[in-house]
Amino acid sequence: MEIKNHNSSTSGFTLLGISSNPHLQKPLFAIFLIMYLVTLVGNVLIILTIHSDSRLHTPMYFFLSNLSFMDICFTTVIVPKMLVNFQSDTKSISYMGCLVQMYFFMAFGNTDSYLLASMAIDRLVAICNPFHYDVIMNPQRCFLMLLGSCTISHLHSMLRVLLMSRLSFCASHVIKHFFCDTQPVLKLSCSDTSSNQMVVMTETLAVIVTPFLCILFSYLRIIITVLTIPSAAGKWKAFSTCGSHLTIVVLFYGSIIYVYFRPLSMYSMVKDRVATLMYTVVTPMLNPFIYSLRNKDMKKQALEIFVNRLSSLSDNN
């Protein structure tokens, strides 16, 4: 039997999706369309709100607005194609389209990771060194932190996609996932994937674990500092500024560690789909609610100003 090589720009893959049950396609389409729209509206609202109120032009909100923008890009790389496939019988994606999706998925996802680390550093400086906060977290340094986050993430994505482009894909071209993720695509290759797996377990480990360790270190320092505050009210006030950020970190990193830091032989299609949905769709949708809309500054100041401006515009029209 002839083995067909699918490693060419004219060949493609078939995305199996979340479910192959034809009766579930329309309900799933409706659910994920609503989730995608909520993600877009929520994160756009956060960005516009921060930029409309000068009182929110601080390092924390600078990183938050960029996190919201990255979340929009992150979900847009995956969800629109997934929605199209819900309505399609072929559920196909081109070989080049698969690599492009994989590149931007990793780039925006890793940038999210570094932005979460930057926000942890911001909280560390604000709580542990408040008198020098404006000097340490100046606009130039915040911009360099953002630039570094994007640069490292895109270089990482480029390396991973270049390694992936050298593989051959024989016989089956059905990706048992709802987008072109690393592990399910590697499972299809008939080439030696040991170098790719080595990169996944080493270079990826460095890229993902470095910001995670930075977050852990920041919160250890924060906890030590907060415990020295004599009053219970003071301790609560300090911890309350970190609760939403910690919630996002747990959701984001918990699912990522489960999916990526296991050998390829332990890959589980169903469990990995659920975990992947958590950080690709659910977490970006919840970010505006968890981090921003529960924040007193956002809720009582910026959102009121933004709503009032919209009302005045509609009245003028």
Image (spheres, grey):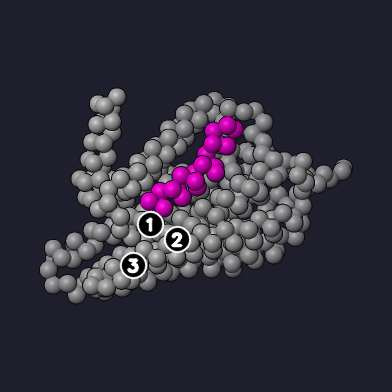
Mark 3 to mark 2 CA distance (whole Å): 12 Å
Mark 2 / mark 1, whichever is N-terminal: 1
Is the residue 135 above or below the residue 64 in the image?
Answer: below
Please name the amino acid that badge 1 sits on.
Phe
Residue 63: mark: 1
Kind of element beneath mark 3: loop
Kind of element beneath mark 1: helix
Residue 117: x and y in percent read: 41, 63
Kind of element beneath mark 2: helix
Q: Depth check: give the residue in front, 136 or 95.
A: 136
Q: Which residue is mark 2?
A: 146
Mark 2 to mark 1 CA distance (whole Å): 8 Å
For the point 34% across and 67% down, which residue is it?
Answer: 137
Q: Is residue 262 visible?
A: no
For the point 75% across and 44% down, which residue is it?
Answer: 9
What segment is highlighted magenta in the picture?
65-85
Mark 3 to mark 1 CA distance (whole Å): 11 Å
For the point 36% across and 56% down, which residue is it?
Answer: 62
CB of mark 2 within 8 Å of CB of mark 1?
A: yes
Residue placed furthest toward the front: 316
Quadrant hosting residue 174 = top right
Q: Which residue is mark 3?
A: 137
Residue 127: mark: none
Quadrant hosting residue 158 = bottom right
Query: Which quarter shows the C terminus?
Result: top left
Residue placed furthest toward the right: 1
What is the crowding at mark 3: few (fewer than 14 residues within 10 Å), some, or many (at least 20)?
some
Q: Is residue 279 left or right of residue 242?
A: right
Is the residue 64 above or below the residue 201 in the image?
Answer: above
